[in-house]
Image (tube, rainbow, N blue to C red):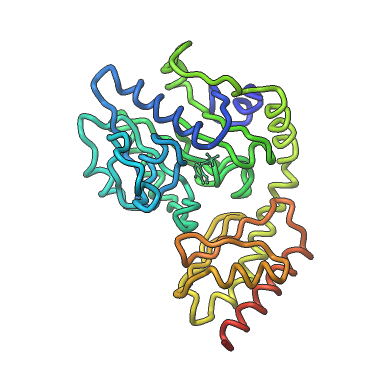
């Protein structure tokens, strides 16, 4: 599995673990070890980020509602504004080791980075000797129509974390590292009992096989068709914005999203809602035309009903 991930990505080394949080914990430790020789330990993160619920990943998650009741959290995670390069630049100090970002925020409300911003982040990290780390836990593995979301943006990180779709339902996470960081963690620096276990690794290999060029092409075709289908709905007065990349699509409302989620569920369509007002659509990558039509039709009925009500 590690070899397959390396062959299909920028990576030189892979650390296998059991979840997205664990993959991010590994990335946090790697960044700290990388910076430790000159006293650097801070990792710049972003408003509305979500990196997991273990203490390190939680500290990197810049959403106060997830922190409540669990302090004190590990220090060293200054928070920059999303898609604003000046805000990142201002936070860099002699203590900064790395930047950690989701190319498309999921829990934060389906917010894609702009391509220009990621390109600037890459250049800034290189200029200042920082690691650029992408959390691809939610937005990689075909979601954007490429195997990894960094390919969609054309910006290569030093570290990439994966989980969720990687195991197709089996618990597995991975941290991928470039040549530059391949020797930062040595034997004994980090570890896991179950990481790389045969059952989950075989499941992940099967998933990678499923993520064929045809499957990725389907994602791009379905993206175009879904956006076309959702556009008329985005004109309803209670819709603020339609956004997303590939099959990771968000519709921000001006009203709470929960009643829409419930109404869709009653009609046999599963969607969810983040940040109280953002309807999040994460359909299966193998979505068919008839399933897409059903989803749009169902949403249209729910929207018409909401408008009338
Ligand atoms: N990172 C991102 C971007 C996520 O969306 C999530 C989960 O929602 C995680 C990390 C945490 O992954 P896990 O629940 O597997 O620990």
Q: Is residue 73 shown left or right of residue 169?
A: left
Residue lying farthest to the top in this orientation: 187
x, y percent for residue 125: 33, 35
Q: Is residue 236 left or right of residue 70?
A: right
- Which residue sits furthest right? 290
Q: Which quadrant of the figure has residue 266? A: bottom right
Q: Is residue 162 left or right of residue 265?
A: left
Query: Number of numbered discs present?
Result: 0
Residue 139, position in %: x, y? Answer: 55, 46
Where the N terminus falls, by quadrant? top right
**For residue 291, above or below residue 25:** below
Identity of the residue drawn at 28% across and 35% down: 75
**Residue sitting farthest toward the bottom:** 308
Q: Which of the 4 image quadrants contains residue 204?
A: top right
In percent of width and height, residue 273 lies at 53, 62
Question: Which residue is at 40% across, 49% downward?
Answer: 66
Residue that appears at 52% across and 69% down: 257
> Viewer-proximal residue, 146 or 154?
146
For the C terminus, give its image quadrant: bottom right
Q: Position of residue 86 (x, y in %)?
A: 26, 49
Q: Nearer the viewer, residue 260 or 249?
A: 260
Residue at image point 46% right, 18% down:
190
Pick the residue in front: 179 or 49.
49
Q: Nearer the viewer, residue 25 or 228?
A: 25
């Amino acid at each position: 599995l590690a070899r397959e991930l390396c062959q299909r990505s920028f990576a030189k080394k892979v650390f296998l673990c059991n979840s997205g949080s664990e993959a991010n914990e590994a990335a946090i430790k790697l960044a700290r070890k990388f910076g430790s020789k000159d006293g650097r330990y801070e990792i710049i993160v972003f408003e509305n980020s979500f990196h997991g619920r273990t203490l390190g990943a939680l500290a990197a998650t810049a959403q106060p509602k997830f922190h409540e009741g669990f302090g004190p959290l590990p220090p060293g995670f200054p928070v920059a504004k999303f898609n604003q390069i000046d805000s990142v630049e201002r936070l860099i100090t002699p203590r900064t080791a790395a930047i950690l970002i989701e190319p498309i925020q999921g829990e934060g409300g389906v917010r894609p980075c702009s391509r220009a911003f990621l390109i600037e982040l890459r250049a800034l990290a290189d200029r200042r000797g920082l690691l650029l780390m992408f959390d691809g836990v939610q937005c990689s593995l075909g979601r954007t129509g490429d195997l990894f979301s960094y390919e969609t943006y054309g910006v290569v990180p030093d570290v990439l974390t994966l989980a969720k779709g990687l195991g197709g339902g089996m618990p597995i996470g991975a941290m991928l590292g470039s040549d530059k960081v391949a020797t930062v963690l040595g034997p004994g620096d980090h570890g896991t009992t179950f990481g790389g276990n045969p059952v989950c690794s075989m499941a992940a290999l099967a998933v990678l096989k499923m993520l064929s060029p045809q499957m990725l092409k389907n994602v791009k075709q379905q993206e175009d068709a879904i956006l076309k289908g959702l556009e008329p709905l985005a004109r309803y007065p209670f819709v603020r914005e339609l956004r997303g990349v590939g099959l990771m699509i968000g519709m921000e409302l001006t009203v709470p999203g929960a009643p829409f989620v419930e109404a869709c569920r009653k009609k046999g369509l599963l969607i969810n809602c983040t940040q109280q007002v953002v309807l999040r659509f994460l359909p299966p990558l193998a979505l068919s035309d008839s399933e897409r039509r059903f989803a749009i039709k169902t949403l249209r009925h729910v929207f018409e009903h909401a408008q009338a009500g």
